[in-house]
Image (cartoon, rainbow, N blue to C red):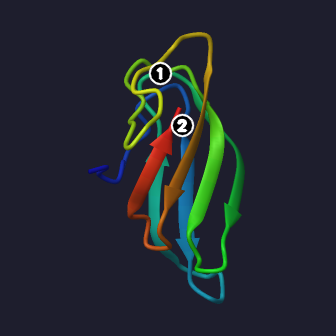
Amino acid sequence: MYKRQGVNNGSYNAFIATLNAYGSSVLHATYLGGSGPDIGYGIALDGSGDIFIAGSTNSINFPVYAAVQSAYGGGGDAFVAAFSNQLNLSLIHI
């Protein structure tokens, strides 16, 4: 199971945060990445409030969960990650 990442492990990581209804308080937050540069390019919500983030990774230790490609392939792999609105992870594909 993916554990929320409280620190930036690489030169830069993607991040996800949920805010309260007024946007004045962070409810949940996590970085997403490994030891190399990882970039989030897009984020979306579905009707249930689940969060989807797409990006690229250059980390040999990028976290994967229920992935089609279970290890970094080199040269900047794409990823799609799905989280609940409380940032519980349901999948990361690279």
Judging by the rendered image, the residue that carries numbered circle 2 is 13
> How far across and how far down the image is residue 22, in percent?
66, 88
In the rendered image, which quarter is residue 76 located in? top right
Question: At 47% across and 36% down in the image, what residue appears?
Answer: 33
Q: Could you classify mark 1 by the number of other residues whose Cα lies within 10 Å: few (under 14), some (14-19), or many (20 or more)?
A: many
User: Please, which residue is most extreme toward the bottom here?
Assistant: 21
- In the image, which disc is placed on residue 46? none
- Helix, strand or loop at disc 1? loop
Residue carrying label 1? 59
Crowd class of label 2 (few under 14; some 14 to 19; many from 20; radius 10 Å): many
Image depth: mark 1 or mark 2 in front:
1
**Residue shown at 67%/69% (left/top)?**
45
- Left or right of residue 69: residue 39: right
Q: Amino acid at mark 2?
A: Asn
At mark 2, the secondary structure is loop
Rendering quarter of residue 74? top right
Tell me residue 19's x, y (percent). Answer: 57, 76
Residue 15: where, in percent of width, then height?
Answer: 55, 50
